Image (spheres, rainbow, N blue to C red):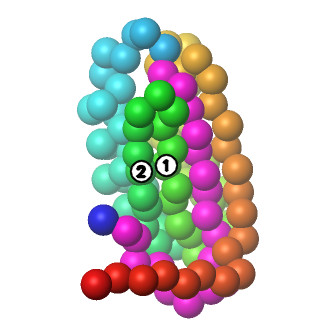
């Protein structure tokens, strides 16, 4: 369930969103984007949750990998549809992960 990331440093793209009332096709496109992102060079994994606010964090090897993903034509189509019909609002944040730690049973 949690992404298995390498030792830092690496990058996190945090995408937070609020859906509009029109969500036809959203779930299918979301699944397609996860599948497509996972095939991109530099992709390390992702975690996602959706209730009132949706938050998806994807992990990347470097800033260049993030830039290439943003320019992917299918991803750009999803971005356009998100702006036109699926999202009331969204925010993207890009962070450098310098340290991580955790616990698991």
Q: Is residue 72 visible?
A: yes
Residue span colored magenta: 2-19
Q: Are marks 2 and 1 in contact (CB under 8 Å)?
A: yes
Residue 79 screen position, x and y as percent: 55, 31
Location of residue 16 (image quadrant):
top right
Q: Earlier in the sequence, mark 2 or mark 1?
A: 2
Measuring 63% from the left and 23% from the top, which residue is drawn there?
89
Task: Classify 10 Å Cα crowding around label 2: few (below 14), some (14-19), many (20 and above).
Answer: some
Residue drawn at x 51%, y 59% as measured from the top left: 58
C-alpha span from label 2 to label 1: 4 Å
Choose top left, top right, bottom left or bottom right for residue 83.
Answer: top right
Badge 1 marks a residue whose secondary structure is strand
Foreground of the two, 34 or 105: 105
Q: Position of residue 10 (x, y in %)?
A: 63, 77
Compared with residue 21, is residue 57 higher up or lower down, i.e. above or below?
below
Q: x, y percentage for residue 39?
A: 37, 63
The residue pinned by badge 2 equals 48
Residue plotted at (35% across, 82% down): 104
Does the segment drawn in magenta span residue 64?
A: no
Q: Is residue 83 left or right of residue 52?
A: right
Quadrant in which the C terminus is drawn: bottom left
In this view, 20 is above or below 49? above
* Residue drawn at (31%, 42%) of the image: 32
Query: What label sits on residue 56 in the rendered view?
Result: 1
């Amino acid at each position: 369930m949690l992404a298995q990331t390498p030792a830092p440093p690496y990058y996190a793209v945090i995408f937070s969103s609020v859906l509009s009332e029109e969500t036809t096709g959203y779930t299918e496109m979301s699944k397609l984007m996860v599948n497509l992102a996972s095939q991109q060079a530099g992709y390390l994994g992702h975690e996602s949750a959706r209730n009132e606010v949706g938050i998806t964090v994807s992990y990347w090897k470097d800033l260049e990998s993030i830039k290439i993903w943003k320019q992917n034509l299918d991803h750009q189509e999803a971005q356009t549809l998100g702006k036109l019909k699926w999202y009331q609002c969204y925010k993207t944040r890009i962070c450098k992960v310098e340290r991580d730690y955790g616990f698991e049973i």
